[in-house]
Image: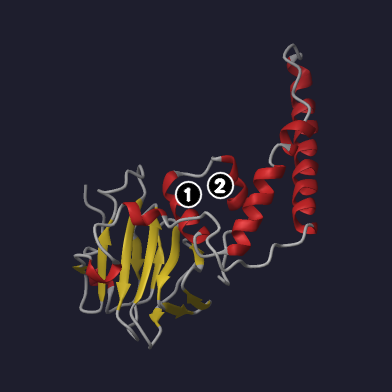
Amino acid sequence: MSAHHPDDLTLLDYSAGSLGLAQALAVSVHLGYCNQCQSQLRKLNALGGVLLEETTPASVGANDDQIPEQNHSQMEELNKSFEALMARIESEPVEPPKRESTGFHNPLERYLPASLDELNWQQQTREIAKFDLTNVVDMGSARVALQKIKAGAKVPVHTHRGNELTVVLKGGFSDELGVYHAGDYIARDPSHKHSPTALQNEDCVCLTVLDAPMKFTGPLMRWLNPLFAWRA
């Protein structure tokens, strides 16, 4: 059972089909590990129509001076509907974890030419390797890759020029904010600075989704930035 999950808004967007393809891939991979989020998603799918049913549409023939007031009223109704929806979801009991397959499959399997151990990894440093999925999976402007860190190795301290989603596929790592194991879903943004360290027992393999390159900040490691820069 995963310990780190997408937030409720992300799951709601996923249920509604409004997440970007790359972000949806990360959520899908996490779902393959996480019975808790599978249960939450089923509730969202079942209750997702409540927002549409309980929100009054704006009048088509409204006068211009009435529109701001009506928009404000609509937003209040939308917020109330969303709060009611989340309250209903949280009040329902969470299904216990199931040992058998629950119908969620790892979507990465269809794109990988081999098992994780047999992939043709591209070495970025002596201890960090990458398998780029950007040319295999069309995810628009986002960059999708598998990252492998040798057991016990440390990624130099860095921040992010944009948003980064990580799903641990194998092994685990720790950083300044926690410890993560297989199935965990981690979201980072430009406000975060961290230095992930793979756990000692085995190599760590993660799916990463970036909407901008990461930025190494340590004085001795800034030379890595060109190696991790995006090329057309």
- Identified by mark 2, the residue type is Tyr
The image quarter containing residue 59 is top right
Tell me if mark 1 has few (under 14), some (14-19) or many (20+) residues whose alpha carbon lies within 10 angstroms of its own: some
Picture coordinates of residue 189, whole percent (x, y): 48, 61
The answer to whether 171 appears left or right of 44 in the picture is left
Q: Residue furthest front?
A: 100
Farthest-out residue, top: 61
Choose top left, top right, bottom left or bottom right for residue 93. bottom right
Q: Image point 58% across, 52% down: which residue?
A: 10
Residue 7 appearing in the image: no
Q: Measuring 22% from the left and 52% from the top, which residue is drawn there?
A: 231
- The amino acid on which the numbered mark 1 sits, given as a three-letter code, is Ala
The residue where tag 1 is placed is 24
The location of residue 139, given as percent across then percent down, is 36, 45
Q: Is residue 175 left or right of residue 93?
A: left
- 181 sits left or right of 153 in the view: right
The answer, for residue 37, to whether it is visible in the render is yes
- Quarter holding the N terminus is bottom right
Residue sitting nearer the eye, 102 or 213: 102
* Mark 1 residue element: helix
**Helix, strand or loop under label 2:** helix
Camera-nearest residue between 63 and 58 = 58
Residue in view at x 74 percent, y 11 percent = 61
Give the residue number, with chain letter if any, for mark 2.
14
Distance from the alpha carbon under mark 1 to that under mark 2: 6 Å
Q: Are the residues at dot 1 and dot 2 in contact (C-beta closer than 8 Å)? A: yes
Q: How many numbered marks appear?
A: 2
At label 2, counting other C-alpha atoms closer than 10 Å, the crowd grade (few under 14, some 14-19, many 20 or more) is many
125 horizontally vs 175: left or right = left
Residue 161: image location, x then y, percent: 40, 58
Instruction: Tell me the residue at 65%/56% (across/down).
Output: 40
